[in-house]
Image (cartoon, rainbow, N blue to C red):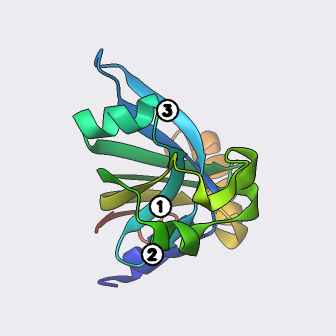
Amino acid sequence: MATDENEKFFDLLSSFDTAMLVTQSNENAMIGRPMAIAQVDLTGSVWFISADNTEKVDEIKNDSHVLVTCQRDHGAYLSLSGFATTSKDRAKIAELWKPMFESWFPEGKGDSRVTLICVKAERGEYWDNRGMNGIRYLYQAVTAYATGTTPDIREGEQHGTVRL
């Protein structure tokens, strides 16, 4: 990792089990879909499992630039933009396979429709108000409201932007 902000970003990203994967449709509309995160790796890649006959797979083939967003309650938010690729790598599918995927693929990891989507992140941003950051933010928000100012967000702790 290049910086503490990168570490913070990956720690937060690794804490999510679902994300919204946003692709661009053939009609130039942005389409977001909830997806289970199969894996996050330290190279900046987020892996998803999908069926090969879906609109999102077609959209990725037409325009590989995607956005991934995550949110947990009011305490943690994350977005990353990058490029997606699809693959039918059977060894990687076996490595990433989780029993929960069988609700979508009753035939299991051997189902010929199973496809990997790998998003290689280029840029990320996070907002982390968990734990002490949440208490700090609440204090800053109340103070800002009372004084007619804006909250003082701590860059690198509560908020950060990273190049991946």
The structure residue drawn at horizontal position 29% and vertical position 58%, both measured from the top left corner, is: 123
Nearest the camera: 91 or 58? 91
Residue 43 is situated, as x and y percent measured from the top left of the image, at 34, 76
Left or right of 56, for residue 107: right
Q: Please rate how many residues cluster around mark 2, counting C-alpha atoms within 10 Å: few if below 14, some from 14 to 19, many from 20.
A: few
Query: In front: mark 1 or mark 3?
Result: 1
- Which of marks 2 and 3 precedes in the sequence? 3
Residue 108, quarter of the rendered image? bottom right
Residue 77, compared with residue 34, is above or below; it is below
Q: Quadrant of the C terminus?
A: bottom left
Q: Badges 2 and 1: C-beta atoms under 8 Å apart?
A: yes
Q: Secondary structure at mark 1?
A: strand
Q: Amino acid at mark 3?
A: Gly
What is the x, y in percent for residue 55? 43, 28
Image coords of residue 1 (percent x, y): 34, 85
Residue, disc 2: 41
What residue did someone put label 3 on? 32
Q: Gap between marks 3 and 2, in whole Å?
A: 22 Å
Camera sees residue 157: no
Estimate the spatial distance between the alpha carbons at disc 2 and disc 1, rounded to whole Å.
Answer: 8 Å
